[in-house]
Image: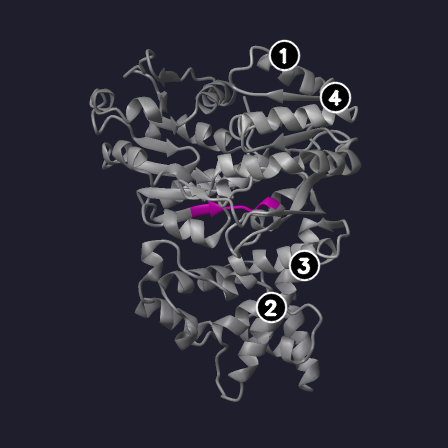
Amino acid sequence: MHELRQYQRDAANAAWKGFREFRKQLMVLPTGAGKTVIFAKMAAHPSLQPALILAHRDELISQAVEKILDVTGLNASIEKAVCRGSKHSEIVVGSMATLAGLDRLDTWPSDHFKMVVVDEAHHSLSKSWQTVLEHFPETKVLGVTATPHRGDRKNLGKFFENVCYEISLLDLVHQGYLSPIKVRTVPLKIDLSKVGRSAGDYSEADSGALLEPMLEQIGDTIFEFAKERKSLVFLPLRQTSRKLCSVLQGRGLAAEHIDGDDPERKQKLEDFKSGKITHLCNAMLLTEGYDEPSIECIIPLRPTASQPLYAQMVGRGTRIYPDKDFLLILDYLWLHEKHTLIRPAHLIAGTTEIASSMTEMSEIEAGKGLTADFDLEALHADALHEREESLRRELAKKAGRKSRTVDALEYALNIGELALAEYEPSMEWEELPPTVKQLEIMARMGITPESITCRGHAAKVMNAIFFRTKNHLATAKQVYWLTKYGHPHPHSVSEIEATKFLSKRWGK
C-alpha cells in the first residue's frame, strides 16, 4: 500500500481538522506534489464515503482511477458518457461534462456523497462547475489547486471558506521532492501589443500568427540553449507546432509534433520517454494528466495571462529524475502591457509586485541583447529582500511612538515572514474585524492590537506566535530588541538564548 510523504500526511490531517468548522476547503499544492494521492487516501476513509472526484478531462479521470487503485486498493467507478457510476461504489470519479447535464446530475441524490473533491479547483467558479457543486448543498467540498498567487486565491475565496493546507514549490524543492528550476532569459523580442484577447486570455490565432515569422529565430535559440536537454515545447496552434517541429528537425534535432488526433500519439510519447525523441512540440495538449519526470527543459511559447495554465505547462518538468540536475525554462523577452503576461516568477511569487520585481531583474541583461541565466529561488530571495527593505523604510517613517507592544508589521519582518508582513485576506471570514479575544491575545503576546487589520490577519499572527512558542523561539518583544541590538539571526534564536543575549546587553 502506498505510504504518504510527511507533507501529504500533514495536508490530509489539516483537511480533516478543517472540516470540523468549514464545509468548503481549499488545498494549495504545486504541480507534482501528488495531490491525487492525498485526496485518494482521504476518499478511502469510511467517514467520507461515498466520495465523488470531479475532473474535466479524460486524462485526469483515468489518472485518478488508476491512482486510487494504486494508493487504496479500491476500484472507483466512472460516471462519464456511457459509463454509469455505481451507487454502491465507495468512490466515484465523475466527468464534469457529463454531470453538468441536469438529466444526469438528477440521477444522484443530493445527499448521496459525503465528500466532493474538485480536482484543478481554479475551474470551480465557472457556471457548469457551480451547477454540479450546488446540487450537493450539504456535502463536504475539498478543492485542490496549484495557484500560489494572492489574486487567484481571493477569487476562489468567493466559493471556498478556508485554505486548510498550503505548501510551496520551493518548499518541495528544498525537501528534495521537486526539481530546482533555472531560467534562461532569451533576448529574442516578441511583441504582444497587437495580440487580441479571447475568453480572457491571449488569442491563440493571433499568437500563432505572431510567432510564425519568428520560428527560424526561435529554432536557432532552442538549438543554442536546449539542444542537449529533453524539451517539451508549448505552442498556441497545431500548425505553429508542426512548423516549429520542422524547423528543429532541419537543425538536426530529434523533434516531433503531437496532437490529440495523431494516430502515432502513443508511440511518440513512448519514444519521448525513451529518448528517441528529444524535443516534443504540442499545442496545449500535454498540460494536464501527463507525467514524464525525465523532461529537462520547458519552452512555453504559448503566451498566457492564466497563472494556473502556466503552472501546468512548467509542471510537466518539475518532477525529479536520476541525473536531472535542474529544470530549465527558456523565457523569451515578451513585450507586453504590464501585469498581464504570466512568467516564471509567478510560479513562486505570492504577489504581483514580487513577480514584477523578479521579472524586471531577469530582463536587465536580456534588454541589452544578452542571454542571462537565473536560479529562480535566488531571484525570489533578491526580490523579497528588496521588498522587505522597502517595508522597513515605511515602518521607519512611523517610528517615534513609545509602546510596550510591537507593531504586527515589524514583528513579521523581524521573524523573516514577508508573507505575513504583506498579508491580505482571501477567504470571506478573514475580512471580518478581529474578535475581542484575538485582540486580547495580541496584547498579551506583545503585539500592538491596533496593528491587526482583520480576523484573518489576527489568526495568521497568532499561528506564527504559537508556532514559535511551541518551538521555544524568542518572543515578540525579545525579537524586537534582538533586532534593535543587531543580532545576526533574531528570528531563529531560542527564548533562552535571547534572554542570555539581552541580559548581557543590558548588564544584568
Marked residue nearer the N-terminal end (1 or 3): 1
Residue 251: give its label.
none
Q: Which region of the structure is painted magenta?
A: 164-169
The residue singled out by tag 1 in the image is: 267
202 or 94, which lies in front? 202
Foreground label between 3 and 2:
3
Specify which label sits upstream in the sequence, 1 or 2: 1
Relative to 332, 31 lies left or right: left
How far is mark 1 from mark 3, CA to CA?
A: 42 Å
Q: Which of marks 4 and 1 is in front?
A: 4
Vertical comparison of 207 with 467: above or below: above
Residue placed under numbered mark 4 in the picture: 254
Kind of residue at badge 1? Gln
Report the disc number at residue 388.
Answer: 2
- Give the answer, above or below, for where 44 lies relative to 198: above
Residue 19 seen anywhere in this rendered image of the structure: no
Three-letter amino acid code at the position of disc 4: Ala
- Mark 3 highlights which residue? 361
User: Which residue corresponds to the image point at 71% horizontal and 71% vertical from the top-left?
Assistant: 488
Find out whether the residues at labels 3 and 2 contact each other: C-beta distance under 8 Å. Answer: no
